[in-house]
Amino acid sequence: MQHSSGYKDIKNKLSVVIITKNEAINIESCLISIRDIADEVIIADSHSTDNTVELATRLGAKVHLIDWLGYAKTRNLAASFATSDWILMLDADETLNANALDFIEQLKMQTDLQDWHYAIQRVSCYLGKWIKHGAWAKDLKFRLYNRQMANWTGEYVHEVLQLNVQNIKVVSLPTNANILHRPFQSITEHAISQAKYAQLSAEEALGKGKTTTALNVIMKPAFYFIKEYVVQMGWRDGKPGLILAYMSGYYRFLKYGIIWTKQNKKGQ
């Protein structure tokens, strides 16, 4: 995918990198949204069984078929395929708004970007509503970086982009320059995702020797529901806010329930 904007004095090439598996419903919107800032698009696909690869290839992306290695290792592998050191890491269910595109385009014209890395505010749409409260309201993502100076870490979930060079400053794009996130098509899809991440998170905790109690299985879900629905005012987002808060509690119920039952089995 070649850069196609009207800017002439581009000094920094940008590789947009996306990891995928069965993302046919999302991948076209994602790729179309970044085509004017991307000098190339790298897709690292973990053997999709739908037409994700076909769609991505048709839109000019360079597709690499890989085995899934976990989130952090897969992101690092995907970034290694890029020809530019400057990486914009996106998920297939994300797009960029016009303000983010303009800001990144201006960055590309700067002479020297080596001392700066960038975080972008992500705004999510859930059940047809853009969420402004609750846990999803403040969602700053560190996604624009030089791969020579940062790498993804984390064995199971909650992968983090870790700077490996001192004195590198991370700055945020303006608050109106956003990643637009449309993660779930239905409540059922969301519940399946929560169960997957709860399982991974529980396995990570157990692998580190962590334990929990029956009280946590009961209290953690209630705590997070109240925190996100009442304290963080998720109720102001209507029905989607209520369901999001409930799903947050559901995730904790599954996570701590899995830890509790498995640790008890070890003790038998």
Image (tube, grey):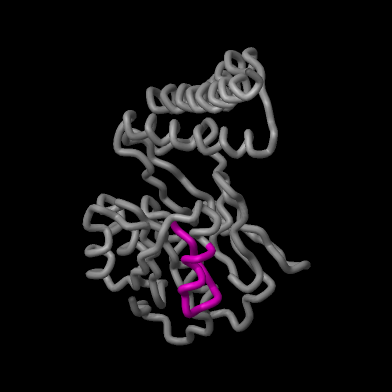
Q: Residue at x 44, y 68 (%)?
A: 16
Quadrant where the C terminus sits is top right
Quadrant for the N terminus in the image: bottom left
Residue 110 image position (x, y, % from top left): 58, 79
Instruction: Please say if 231 is above or below 169.
Output: above
Look at the picture and state if 78 lies above or below 112: above
- 49 sits to left or right of 151: left
Q: Position of residue 169 (x, y in %)?
A: 71, 64
Q: Can residue 231 be seen in this view?
A: no
- In the rendered picture of this protein, how many numbered marks are placed on residues? 0
On screen, residue 40 above or below 169: below
In the rendered image of this protein, does residue 262 appear above or below residue 87? above
In the image, 183 versus 219, the foreground residue is: 219
Name of the residue lying farthest toward the right: 167
Q: Nearer the viewer, residue 122 or 211?
A: 211
Outermost residue, front side:
268
Q: Which residue is drawn at 45% across and 26% down?
A: 247
State left or right for residue 4 relative to residue 76: left
Picture quarter containing residue 162?
bottom right
> Residue 184 is drawn in which quadrant?
top left
Identify the image quadrant of residue 35: bottom left
The residue located at (40%, 69%) in the rendering is: 42
Asked whether residue 87 is drawn in magenta, I would say yes
Residue 21 screen position, x and y as percent: 34, 53
What residue is drawn where x is 51% and y is 73%?
Answer: 106
Residue 94 x %, y %: 40, 53
Q: Nearer the viewer, residue 201 or 188?
A: 201
- Magenta-colored span: 76-90
